Image: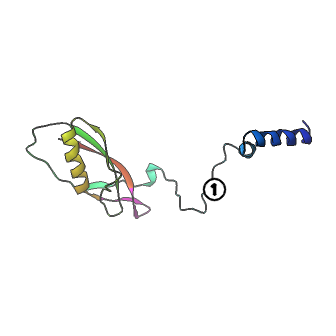
Amino acid sequence: MTIAQIRLLLSVMACVAPGAAAAQAEHPDTLPNHSDSNTILLTPKDITPPTVQECPRFTGLTRHGTVMVATIVDTLGHAELHPTRILKSSDDSLSTLALRATLLCTFKPGRYRGKAIRVAIHLPFNF
């Protein structure tokens, strides 16, 4: 294929699908350069996970079951409200109690290189 034929092919591609020629020119395995941003890629072995320090106990319940809650523990050791959600529950009334308990729990925050960081956790509640 000559250079003239390649130019003709690229101009036809640009007319048919704008941006397609530019997309084809990039290598698909190229990753964006994050050197200018604050992105840090971590693995679980780099992080000390948060631990529960105090959590309310519910006594005298007539229903029994397990609820799995997903949340993010902030740098102060508290569960954040908005990303908190129920992953699995055997009873909706227990889900409400588990959400309340999650927000009342205090944690020792997760750490990376000695600094407190936000960490996503899954927290099981057995009633």
Relative image position of residue 57 (x, y in whole percent): 15, 50
> Which residue bears the numbered disc 1?
33
What is the magenta segment's predominant secondary structure?
strand
Q: For the image shown, how many numbered marks are present on the structure?
A: 1
The C terminus - image quarter? top left
Give me the residue at 52% from left, 54% from top.
41
Residue 115 forms part of the magenta stretch: yes
Give me the residue at 25% from left, 55% from top.
103
Q: In screen coordinates, is 16 left or right of 126?
A: right
Q: Nearer the viewer, residue 19 or 6?
A: 19
Q: Element type at marker 1?
A: loop
Q: In screen coordinates, is 114 left or right of 23?
A: left
Magenta stretch: give its range.
Answer: 108-118
| Amino acid on which the number 1 mark rests in the picture | Asn
Q: Residue furthest front?
A: 15
Residue 80 sits in quarter: bottom left
Mark 1 burial class by Cα count in 10 Å: few <14, some 14-19, many 20+: few
Give me the residue at 17% from left, 53% from top.
56
Q: Residue furthest left?
A: 60
Relative image position of residue 94 (x, y in whole percent): 19, 41
The N terminus - image quarter? top right
Its colouring scheme is: rainbow
Relative image position of residue 105 (x, y in whole percent): 24, 55
Give me the residue at 75% from left, 38% from top.
16
Q: Is residue 105 above or below residue 10?
A: below
Q: Nearer the viewer, residue 76 or 8?
A: 8
Relative image position of residue 25 (x, y in whole percent): 75, 45
Q: Is residue 30 above or below residue 109?
A: above
Q: In screen coordinates, is 23 left or right of 127?
A: right
